[in-house]
Image (cartoon, grey):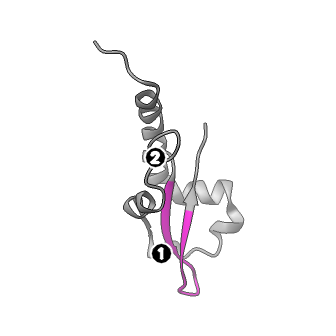
Amino acid sequence: MPKKSLKQVVAELDSPWKYAMRHFFRSFMEFCLPELAMPIDWAQGYETLDKELQKIFPHSQTGKRFSDMLFKVWLHNGQEKWIFIHLEI
C-alpha cells in the first residue's frame, strides 16, 4: 500500500471536524461564541458556503484547508452575515 503524504493525512483528520461543524454549527456558536450567536435568527437556518470559500482562498500554503468553513446566517433584523470558522485541533 502506498505511503500517504502529510497533506492526505491532514485532510483525513480535518474531514470529521468539518462534518461536525456542518451539523452542529448552532451548538458550537452558542457554546463557544454566545455573544455572536445571540443576534442570529436560527429559525431562518444557515448555509455552508464551501464554494464561495474556495473562491476566496483557492489554495493555501499548506494545501486545501478542509477545517475552514464559511457560513451564511441571517440576523434578527433581517441582515445577512457571513461567518468564517477556522479550527485547529
Binning the other alpha carbons within 10 Å of mark 1 as few (below 14), some (14 to 19) or many (20 upward) gives: few
Query: Which one is nearer the viewer's eye here, 57 or 23?
Result: 57
The answer to which image quadrant residue 85 occupies is: bottom right
| Mark 2 lies on residue | 18
Query: Magenta stretch mostly in which secondary structure?
Result: strand
Query: Which one is nearer the viewer's eye here, 75 or 31?
Result: 75
The label shown at residue 43 is 1
**Depth-wise, is mark 2 or mark 1 nearer the camera?**
2
Residue 18 is a magenta residue:
no
- Residue furthest to the left in view is 1
User: Residue at the spot x=44%, y=27% of the render?
Assistant: 9
Compared with residue 80, is residue 54 higher up or lower down, i.e. above or below? above
- Left or right of 52 on screen, residue 25: right
Position in image of residue 77 (x %, y %)? 58, 87
Q: Which residues fall within the magenta stretch?
A: 69-83
Compared with residue 7, is residue 17 higher up or lower down, i.e. above or below? below
